[in-house]
Image (cartoon, rainbow, N blue to C red):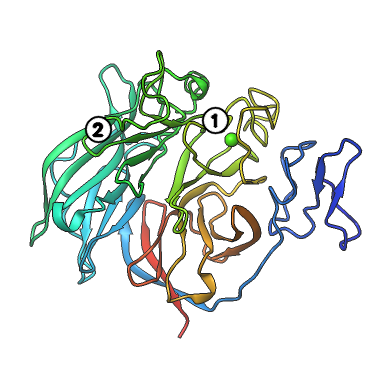
Amino acid sequence: MRIQLIAASLSVLTCASGAIAVSSAQGVDPRPPNGAGQSPAFPGQTDAPEKKLNVAFEAVTVVEGLQNPWSVAFLPGGKMLITERPGRLRVLGTDGKLSEPLAGLPPVDARGQGGLLDVVLDPNFASNRTIYWSYAEPREGGVNNTAVAKATFVDGAAPKLEDIKVIYQQMPSLNSPLHFGSRLVFGRDGTLFVAQGDRSITEGRMQSQRMDGLLGKIVRINTDGSVPKDNPFVGKEGVRPEIWSLGHRNIQSAALHPTTGELWEVEHGTRGGDEINIARKGKDYGWPTIAYGIEYRGGAITGGITAKEGMEQPLYYWDPVIGPSGMAFYTGTLFPAWQGSLFVGGHATNDLVRLTLDGEKVVGEERLLTENKERIRDVRQGPDGALYLLSDSATARLFKLVPKK
Ligand SMILES: [Ca+2]
């Protein structure tokens, strides 16, 4: 239960049931929550108080004319790779010009939320020139799934890809244009996390708790596509050994914590259930058995409950949602006041969410770019310490936040 307090000095109180109710009087979002009658599992799990840092910055356009760009990666020397969801991977030169789309990518299924998605560099890119990307893969019979491919990037006047290999295919394939995830994040040990979605349709949703399928899972693989021997379910009968964690809905934001090295992710909920989790080895994040919020059409979500023994609570959730896409822990020197902040793109709220963290607690929230009215698809810290963002539309842009002169 959430209680709108009249006395603003009181922000937390204990209900008769013993559950903690938190006032939304201080939070940044004035809209009422969707999950009427739902209580956070602990104080501060949602609706953190507004904490403005009042950092003076300006948004500078880096390149315009992108069609639904999805991800940006920084090459050594100042060039960048940019994916566009319809299926194009292009190089942005230091002269600000976009290359022709690189040839040879496996076909993508660009219906709905599908297409070409994340792109990352190998941690040893300087020596092996290898890149990885995720995408919605069309399969025979009208079905599709999330997939990951790798290639050697050959730079030059006409950059190109060599040795293209598909290293991962989510299974089972379904016929759905939705919830492909996905983000690719390298662990410190050089394994690759693939953060995915549940494909949205009921058949996929129910897969999130099934151990013989890879929907609604974060998987962990080696860069040749093989399974690391220390994955949590290796050798368990009937369980896919690629699984790292389960019970996820749709992940389009993931990043390694800069000091702990753990994988943090922000996933899309339904109406009122966007959540931040630290994806730990073998843990169950609950979807669709437990969730905050309600169905898009209204009414309780599959399990009808928000907490259950053996299922992880999100460390923070939004109700109403932000539509999280892209995230970055800020560690740069360009904005000293932002060091330690977690930035998350608001694809639904058309803004940039900045969170003040205290360890694993969200203790303050701030909304930036509230005048922009652009959907945000990706958020990355650049090598120059600027915060780079991709907007999302048919005529979108890459822009960066730099200190205001
Ligand atoms: Ca969850």
Give the SS element for disc 2: loop
On the rendered structure, is 206 left or right of 143?
A: right
* In the depicted structure, whether residue 35 falls above or below residue 159: above
Amino acid bearing label 1: Asp
Q: Is the residue at mark 1 in contact range of ligand 1, meaning its CB lies under 8 Å from it?
A: no
Q: Quadrant of the C terminus?
A: bottom left
Q: Which residue is farthest bottom?
A: 405
Residue 380 % position (x, y): 40, 60
Residue denoted by label 1:
284
Residue at 87 percent across and 54 percent down: it is 5
Q: Which residue is farthest top?
A: 237
* In the depicted structure, whether residue 235 falls above or below residue 103: above
Q: Earlier in the sequence, mark 2 or mark 1?
A: 2
Give the image quadrant in which the ligand numbered 1 is located: top right
Q: For residue 388, what is the image quadrant?
A: bottom left
Residue 266 % position (x, y): 52, 45
Residue 159 % position (x, y): 11, 55
Amino acid bearing label 2: Gly
Residue at 28 percent across and 27 percent down: it is 138
Residue at 49 percent across and 28 percent down: it is 200
Nearer the observer, 115 or 6? 6
Q: Mark 1: give few (<14), some (14-19) or many (20+) Cα within 10 Å.
A: many
Q: Mark 2: give few (<14), some (14-19) or many (20+) Cα within 10 Å.
A: some
Q: Quadrant of the N terminus?
A: top right
Residue denoted by label 2:
225
